[in-house]
Amino acid sequence: MRRGGFTLIEVIIAIAILSILASMAVPYAAKLIDKSREESTRKEMEELYNTILGDPKVPTGGTVGDMGRLPNSITELNVQGAQPLGSTGLLGVKFGWFGPYVNTGFDPQGYLNDAWGTPYAYGNPGAGQIRSAGPDRVMGNADDLIYPPNAVTFTGRLLVNLYVWDNTAGQYRQNPTPAQVTGMGVTYFYSNNGNQTSVSITVPPTGVGPPYSFNGYHAGLHAVTGTCQLVGSPAAATGQAVVYVPGNNQQAQLGLYLR
């Protein structure tokens, strides 16, 4: 009759089975951890990118919209340094540094590192790109994560169409011709290294518009003003608006109504 308990052979076999299962489970668990860290890192890189270039879904201008340029480093998102302190310009559009831009929670330096604890490389391999060294923690290998996939162009283009109120006709007139006006102009406000600056198109210039194009200025929120006096009108019609211009050489359009 067999007594209760296990024989030595049974214990050895059980230990061997557990060892085999453990040897199989550890690499699988490590892969799950790396997968979770990769997802977390990709999400954070995208959030950092939207903080820099802005998010057209909101829309917000990001640091590019506030400063008029790409940051020199990720640190500039939360450290003002020599950047001019933010102020509010025409129509509430922001200019200058309005950081900190990243909510760091309990770790004020956490946004500088990926989920493996390795510092991000910024502007690598191209302008505005953020690079993580990935699971092997060595920059430049095949497991590196890069966002966005292509170098960033922080400028875009705005096309403005003017709609001028005609008191005589009782309706708006779209893009009056030079012969129909005594004077007309469009002014576009942008940030130059954190300082509000503007550029104007006066009509009628030779070979310009309509629509009137502002090309090569930074992405973000912009104030636009216009003025136009139709022939025979006693006073000029005026108008103003805020428009979001995307980066990466994308184009936005604005219908500016003057009355």
Image (cartoon, rainbow, N blue to C red):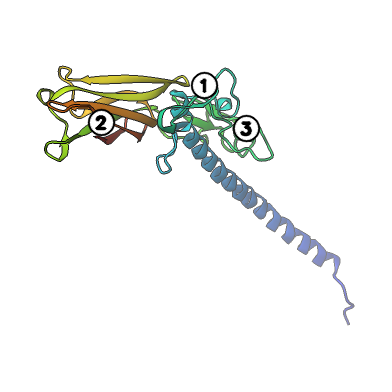
Q: Amino acid at mark 1?
A: Asn
In terms of secondary structure, where does tag 1 sit? loop
Q: Residues within 10 Å of mark 3 (few under 14, many from 20)?
A: some
Disc number placed over residue 159 in the picture, else none: 2
Q: Is residue 172 visible?
A: yes
Mark nearer the viewer, 1 or 2: 2
| Residue found 30% across the figure and 35% down from its top | 252
Of the residues under marks 1 and 3, which one precedes in the sequence? 1
Furthest residue to the bottom?
A: 1
Rendered location of residue 168, percent (x, y): 12, 36
Furthest residue to the front?
A: 234
Q: Which residue is mark 1?
A: 72
Q: Nearer the viewer, residue 198 or 126?
A: 198
In terms of secondary structure, where does tag 3 sit? loop
Q: CA distance from mark 3 to mark 2?
A: 43 Å
Q: Amino acid at mark 2?
A: Leu
| Residue found 48% across the figure and 21% down from its top | 194
Q: Which residue is mark 3?
A: 118
In terms of secondary structure, where does tag 2 sit? strand
Of the residues under marks 3 and 2, which one precedes in the sequence? 3
| Residue found 21% across the figure and 32% down from its top | 162
In the image, is 233 to the left or to the right of 5? left
Q: Amino acid at mark 3?
A: Thr
